[in-house]
Image: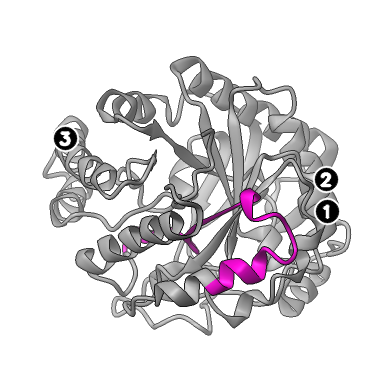
Amino acid sequence: MKPPFRADHVGSLLRTASVKTNRHEWKLGNLTAEELRAIEDAAILETVKKLESTGMKAITDGEFRRDYFHLDFLKELAGVTVTGGMDANPNAKVAEDGFKPPVLSVTGKLHHQKDIQVADFNYLKSIVTQTPKVSIPSPTMIHFRGGRKSIDIQAYPDMDEFFHDLSQAYKQEIDHLYAAGLRYLQLDDTNLAYLCDPKMRAAAAERGEDPNELPRTYAALINSVIDNRPSDLTVGIHLCRGNYRSTWFAEGGYEPVAEILFNEINVDAYFLEYDDERSGDFAPLRFVPKNKHVVLGIISSKVKELENIDDLCKRIDEAAQYMPLENLCVSPQCGFSSTHHGNDLTHDDQWRKIELVVNTAIKVWGEA
């Protein structure tokens, strides 16, 4: 079976104690980059073997080499600058140290100056027996939060040129990953989900953007990156309403973006957050074409409580009222550690959740 698999996952996993401790030491200058990488290699090897032992066929490196699911990738593009912290999230716990996640801006011409994920993928590929998967931030992540104001007017007086350069940079990275052997790629996109939230839509309008047109703009951007890809490269997109330290940023069902999301973005699969009422009902799935898959994120990576497998099966049956069961899969609603801080789960909780994903897939479809 080509990906996505009946049992799948979004990408990030809780960092091991060794990775967390030694990454901090590296930031303090007490470890070299090479020493840290060797420690990460060992932790990734151990974690990959455990992930494969659950029956999961999509295998990531847990994003152990990143602090953030998006910034560590995006800051490696020439022209991107990461500074400061974003406005406090009213739904988030107050960090004890006053920490706020950094924000990015475009301060110069965008281009692909070096491979970003290729070395990490090569290591992952060398240690897996199942399908290696790489998750990278969607190209829309550079635009949404700041809009035009976060993009230097001297570098990009014309936004068409901005989107063109951004697309070219992404295409180069994906081409190099494919040449290295990658066949399963996921784009992580919070923005299309944020555009389901009336407050987020209003904020976009205040920045001078049209929230009704942005989904179409983003569809065109994503397609410019992935169209004409090789036929054996599966591309999925993951939508999320926030996952920082088990908190969230947005709410609202998929209806405002559903038609464009499912019919104008040329991906093979959608990883959709569906773990609580903030995501709305399954009715928007009626727009999904017959040649695409949806991975239902009905198991929460945010909370410790383990879902009931019979309840999960019932939810999958509900979704199957709107699209064929054979085009559905199951996963957690997001990663377990979108940032290095992790979520409110222990490692044991995480592995129980992953095993539940696999067991649910086997119960519904007879395979993981």
Residue at image location 61% in from the left, 68% down from the top: 317
The residue that mark 2 highlights is 264
**Residue 121, percent from left and from top:** 38, 28
Label 3 sits on what residue type? Thr
Q: Residue at x 15, y 33 (%)?
A: 38
Mark 3, residue position? 32
Q: Residues within 10 Å of mark 1 (few under 14, many from 20)?
A: some
**Among the two numbered marks 1 and 3 on one chain, the one whose residue lies closer to the N terminus:** 3
Q: Label 2's element? A: helix
* 244 left or right of 140 in image: left
Q: Amino acid at mark 2?
A: Glu
Residue 270 lies, in percent from the top left, at 63, 51
Q: Residue at x 51, y 42 (%)?
A: 136
Asked if the residues shown at circle 1 and circle 2 are in contact, with their CB atoms under 8 angstroms apart, the answer is: yes
| Separation (CA) of disc 3 from disc 2 | 45 Å
Q: Amino acid at mark 1?
A: Ile
- Say above or below: 176 vs 63: above
Picture colour scheme: one colour
Task: Specify whether residue 334 is painted magenta.
Answer: yes
Q: Is residue 38 left or right of residue 331?
A: left
Rendered location of residue 81, percent (x, y): 53, 45
Which residue is label 1 attached to?
260
Any part of residue 122 in sight: yes
| Frontmost residue, 357 versus 148 | 357
Query: Label 3 crowding class (10 Å Cα cut-off): few <14, some 14-19, many 20+?
Result: few
Magenta highlight range: 314-341
Query: Mark 3 or 2 closer to N-term?
Result: 3
Q: Is residue 149 above or below residue 227?
A: below
Front of the two marks 3 and 2 = 2
Name the element at disc 1.
helix
* Count of numbered circles in the view: 3
Compared with residue 283, is residue 142 higher up or lower down, i.e. above or below? above
